[in-house]
């Protein structure tokens, strides 16, 4: 178990509301950690403003200045590693990461995805859920591997889709759900309870055999 606070680096591309929920949880000591830096690949990301207001160092590393994904990721690694992170958190970071990046942070790189994985990897999950006529929707936190949205699932939360739900209402509902789920998972990691071994998520050293173990009806 971690005795001291862990260093957390958060990567964003947009609004940064999940980032804000983690920063808030650190500041209220619900997470035994500190957000050492917030890094965005987009200059207009509102999350950088949120970081400034929260007195968290914010950095821009614009991906448009790089010719290849690999060259950008190498620079991103150099920036992240300045903060000696115990955990790197993807919070709406809208880039596919290179294998070199993923492997560099294996076991300490997590992501949140707005679907009940393995359903609906990729984009436009709310629209696809509605078009498929699903009765439940949700969000998943997983360790990041080279497979897009395919790393071992740590925890999920789900909600019932109501007849009147639209893409907009589901967006709001899922965000509210994520703002509870993501800090909780980061908190487990900060307590030394969460790890990854042999491409499997472990809680207290035991395999998380099914995401249903951590699903809220």
Image: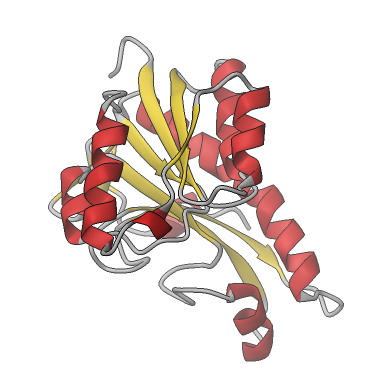
* Tally of numbered tags: 0
Q: Position of residue 204 (x, y in %)?
A: 28, 33
Along the line of sight, which residue is nearer the eye, 129 or 204?
Answer: 129
Q: Toward which corner of the image does residue 121 lie, by quadrant?
A: bottom left
Quadrant in which the N terminus is drawn: top left
Q: Position of residue 175 (x, y in %)?
A: 67, 53
Quadrant in which the C terminus is drawn: bottom right
Q: Is residue 200 visible?
A: no
Along the line of sight, which residue is nearer the eye, 191 or 5?
Answer: 5
Along the line of sight, which residue is nearer the eye, 105 or 75?
Answer: 75
Q: Is residue 112 left or right of residue 203?
A: right
The residue depicted at 44 percent of the width and 50 percent of the height is 62
Q: Position of residue 14 (x, y in %)?
A: 60, 51
The residue depicted at 71 percent of the width and 49 percent of the height is 176
Q: Residue furthest top?
A: 4
Judge whether 126 appears above or below 194 on screen: below
């Amino acid at each position: 178990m971690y005795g001291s606070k862990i260093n957390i680096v958060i990567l964003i591309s947009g609004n940064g509301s999940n980032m804000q929920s983690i920063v808030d949880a650190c500041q209220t000591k619900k997470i035994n950690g500190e957000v050492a830096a917030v890094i965005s690949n987009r200059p207009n990301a509102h999350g950088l403003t949120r970081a400034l207001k929260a007195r968290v160092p914010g950095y821009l590393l614009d991906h448009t200045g790089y010719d290849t994904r690999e060259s950008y990721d190498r620079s991103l690694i150099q920036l992240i590693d300045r903060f000696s992170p115990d955990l790197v958190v993807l919070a709406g970071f809208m880039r596919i990461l290179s294998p070199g990046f993923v492997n560099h942070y294996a076991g300490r790189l997590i992501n949140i995805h707005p679907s009940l994985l393995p359903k609906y990897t990729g984009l436009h999950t709310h629209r696809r859920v509605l078009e498929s006529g699903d009765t439940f929707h949700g969000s998943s936190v997983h360790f990041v591997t080279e497979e897009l949205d395919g790393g071992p699932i740590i925890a999920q939360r789900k909600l019932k889709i109501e007849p009147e739900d639209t893409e907009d209402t589901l967006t709001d509902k899922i965000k509210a759900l994520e703002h509870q789920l993501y800090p909780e998972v980061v908190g487990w990691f900060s307590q030394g309870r969460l790890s990854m071994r042999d491409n499997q998520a472990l809680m207290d050293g035991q395999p998380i055999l099914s995401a249903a173990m951590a699903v809220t009806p």
